[in-house]
Image (spheres, grey):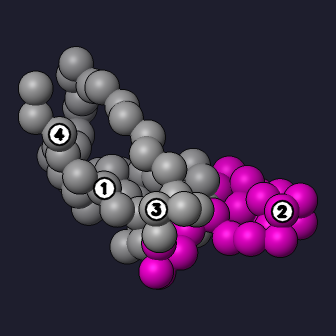
Amino acid sequence: MVIPPLDLSPGIDFSNKVRSLFNTSVTSSTPDDAHSFCLFAFFARSKIKLDVANVSLILQSLLGGVASDFAVVEVKD
């Protein structure tokens, strides 16, 4: 199943708030371990295929930034 069109306004609002409070962006095209963090999420079921590209787009819609800058990795068991 193809991911439906996403509303990017929540992510834009969130990233604007991060920029105004911390003077930094939500994502970086050159991340480093000192300023990055890991987010683990577990999904038992999904109506859409949760691949790297779709999860990156979902993160962009929620957190702002650029989808391709999220270093999404699938972790097996």
Say which amino acid is labelled 2. Phe
Disc 1 to disc 4, C-alpha distance: 10 Å
Disc 4 to disc 2, C-alpha distance: 30 Å
Q: Earlier in the sequence, mark 4 or mark 2?
A: 2
Residue underneath mark 2: 22
Kind of element beneath mark 4: loop
Q: Which class describes the residues within 10 Å of circle 4: few (<14), some (14-19), or many (20+)?
A: few
In-front residue for pair 44/34: 34
Depicted 55 relative to depicted 16: above or below: above
Residue underneath mark 1: 72
Task: Tell us which disc is closer to us: 3 or 2.
Answer: 3
Kind of element beneath mark 1: loop
Disc 1 to disc 2, C-alpha distance: 23 Å
Task: Tell us which disc is closer to us: 4 or 3.
Answer: 3
Any mark on residue 33, and which?
3
Q: Position of residue 6 (x, y in %)?
A: 48, 54
Residue at (21% x, 22% y) in the render: 45
Q: In the picture provided, is 34 more to the left or to the right than 13?
A: left
Q: Is residue 40 visible?
A: yes
Asked if residue 6 is among those painted magenta in the image, a careful observer would answer: no
Q: Quadrant of residue 52?
A: bottom left
Say which amino acid is labelled 3. Asp
Disc 4 to disc 3, C-alpha distance: 19 Å
Q: Are marks 4 and 3 in contact (CB under 8 Å)?
A: no
Q: In the picture provided, is 47 more to the left or to the right than 36?
A: left
Say which amino acid is labelled 4. Val
Say which amino acid is labelled 1. Val
Q: Earlier in the sequence, mark 4 or mark 3?
A: 3
Depicted 1 relative to depicted 65: above or below: above
Kind of element beneath mark 2: helix
Residue underneath mark 4: 75
Q: Which residues are magenta?
A: 10-31
